[in-house]
Amino acid sequence: MPKRSNRFQRLVTMLTATLADKAKVTESAMLEDKVTNDLREVDVLVELVAATYPISLSIEVISWARKADVTWVEKMRAKHENLSTNKLILVSESGFSDQAKKKAKFYEIDTLEIEEACGTDWDLLASLESVGTFIVTSINYSVQAVCKFENGLLEQLPISLTASFPTNRGHLSMDEMVREMLSNQEVIESLRANLKSEQEHDFWAQYTEKNGLWDIEHCGSIGKIQELRIGLKVKESCSPVKFASGKFRSTPFVSGESLSGIDNLQFALAKTQNGSIEGYLIDNSGIRPLSGNSL
């Protein structure tokens, strides 16, 4: 977790990531000041590509007991005048004064706040409250490929998770393919059935097809990937959780924080338009996505 992060900033980061679709969301991002060349911290940075142009949305977060005022709005505007920010969004835990909203609107700065819990998805909250605990399964993985080259040589090579491969749904990164495999409920249940303690466990998964997988070129030699070998490091922990609820950008959400202090665990969940439950979790290992299969 970034050193200058706080509970409310983490919540805004997770909710933004949940609603941002394919955009990249970074907490406590560093942007270069165009005048001084110093690096300045932005609470939450959303990066996306629109019509081939990169767009940066900067979100600044404040957690005061009182409403955010004109002075803070002006301070944030001045800060971002010299940063590569295409759009500035301000979020206040306690809302904004009327004058602050007027000033932000004049400068075309969006203001957001966490709305009251009247719009909460109560069914989702009730289902979580009835359990009272949150089970987190952390999975780190690496991928090796068994390759057969034209000279008949078999060699096992590491595969980058960012490497892209053609599929019947277009090109997917190795990371996307592994995540898709791990989202399968049968795979999750199989892993959990073999977790005997909260210690980290090692597993291997293999994937192959009759005629091989993909062509590959390595050190000038042409070959074919015959098999993927996926190394999994899995750890499951269970923590009692304190829940909260509200609305963000008109979307009801449920959030939670660990009561046992395990890894500074905090999460946020919301229902998407298709009815699935998605969200993000932050702990000492960083931020990562959650889905209904993770609950």
Image: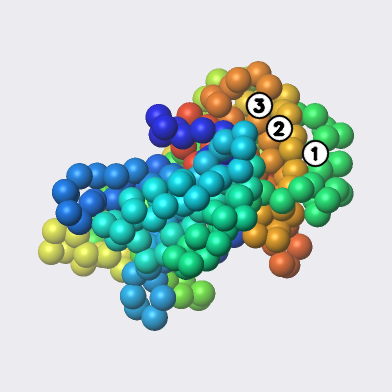
Whether the residues at callouts 2 and 1 have beta carbons within 8 Å, the answer is yes
User: Where 260 sits versus 169, above or below?
Assistant: above
User: Where 159 sits versus 236, above or below?
Assistant: below
Task: Quote the CA–CA distance across marks 2 and 3.
Answer: 8 Å
Instruction: Let me know if residue 291 appears in the view.
Output: no
Farthest residue in the bottom direction?
51
User: Of callouts 2 and 1, which one flags the residue occurring earlier in the amino acid sequence?
Assistant: 1
Q: Position of residue 146 (x, y in %)?
A: 34, 52
Report which quarter residue 214 is drawn in: bottom left
**Foreground pick, 56 / 282:** 56
Q: Mark 3 = which residue?
A: 258
Local secondary structure at mark 1: helix
User: Of callouts 2 and 3, which one flags the residue occurring earlier in the amino acid sequence?
Assistant: 2
Local secondary structure at mark 2: strand
The kind of residue tagged 3 is Ser
| Badge number at residue 134 | 2
**Foreground pick, 234 / 281:** 281
